[in-house]
Image (cartoon, helix red, strand yellow):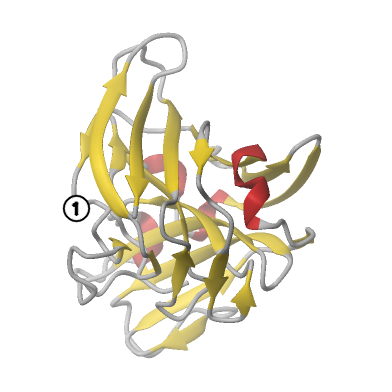
Amino acid sequence: MIPRSGKAGTDAVGDGNDYAASVSGVLSKSIGSFPTVSGVTTEVGIGGPNDYTLQLNSNFMTTAACKGISACRSWQQFIYSSGEQAVFMQYWLIKYGTSCPNGWTNFETDCYANSSAVLAPVEAITSLHTLKLSGTAKLHGRDTVVFTAGAMAYSTTGKDSMVDLATAWQQSEFNIVGDGDSSAAVFNPGSVVRVKIVVTNGSTAAPTCAAKAGTTAETNNLKLHACTGVGGAHPYIAFNESN
């Protein structure tokens, strides 16, 4: 699930062309969901029908995990992969160099690592409105990802110190996109999906809809519409995407 390249342009959602819920201060939790879905009957990904990821992604951050390397940015993803039938977190040290820390894997000039994973079944695209993904960051503790499908929940944890998410998480991107390797989730014509991103940062203020703030390279074939930020006990942004 690689970082954005910006090569996809504006005809697809993803690879930078996405909204993120942006806050002042630091996020401790974010929840992504699809409160309304209409017209969706099929989705095809790199592995065939019903192959996609739900990704809840942080902003690119400057944290202690970069060990003072000036070009380095840390990044964390909370992921459900239908193709892998797994829920996990993926950590990145972008432009860290080719000599990665122990336990990390080199990808060009970046380094990445995965948390432990929990098995979760393939969910058909027609169940999209029942799916949620949440991420929680805990300073000096363990971060948590929870994938919810109807009445079932699947969760795993990992050390926050992997990229020090809890110190610099200020934007949350959430969407349904391709299943890795810059791939796309391709929906049938006439699909309309509403995306909602709830944030927790100790404030009731409405988060900002940060445009062009997506961080993953994976995409879908929908187009973005207007985004709105709403304050209150559970502040959120919401927007539609359709084809």
Q: Can residue 168 be seen here? A: no
- Say if 32 sits above or below 117 in the image: above
In the image: residue 32, left or right of residue 120 = left
Give residue 224's position: percent from left, percent from top. Answer: 27, 48
Name which residue lies at 30% across and 57% down.
60
- Residue under the point 64% across and 44% down: 144
The one of 182 and 112 positioned closer to us in this rendering: 182
Kind of residue sitting beneath label 1: Lys
65 relative position to 77: left or right: left
Residue 134 point in image, percent of width and height: 58, 40
Residue closest to the eye, 118 or 151: 151
Kindly indicate the quadrant of the structure image that contains residue 140.
top right
Q: Is residue 96 above or below residue 168?
A: below
Query: Residue drawn 34% across and 46% down?
Result: 241
Assign the C terminus to one quadrant of the image.
bottom left
Image coordinates for residue 194, horizontal then vertical, percent: 43, 37
Mark 1 residue element:
loop
> Which residue is labeled 1 in the image?
212
Picture mark count: 1
Query: Picture coordinates of residue 62 (x, y %)?
Result: 28, 55
Q: Is residue 75 left or right of residue 123?
A: left
Which residue is at the front of the view, 39 or 94? 39
Callout 1 crowding tier (Cα within 10 Å): few <14, some 14–19, many ≥20: some
Q: Quadrant of residue 53?
A: bottom right
Q: Do we see residue 128 in this rendering?
A: yes
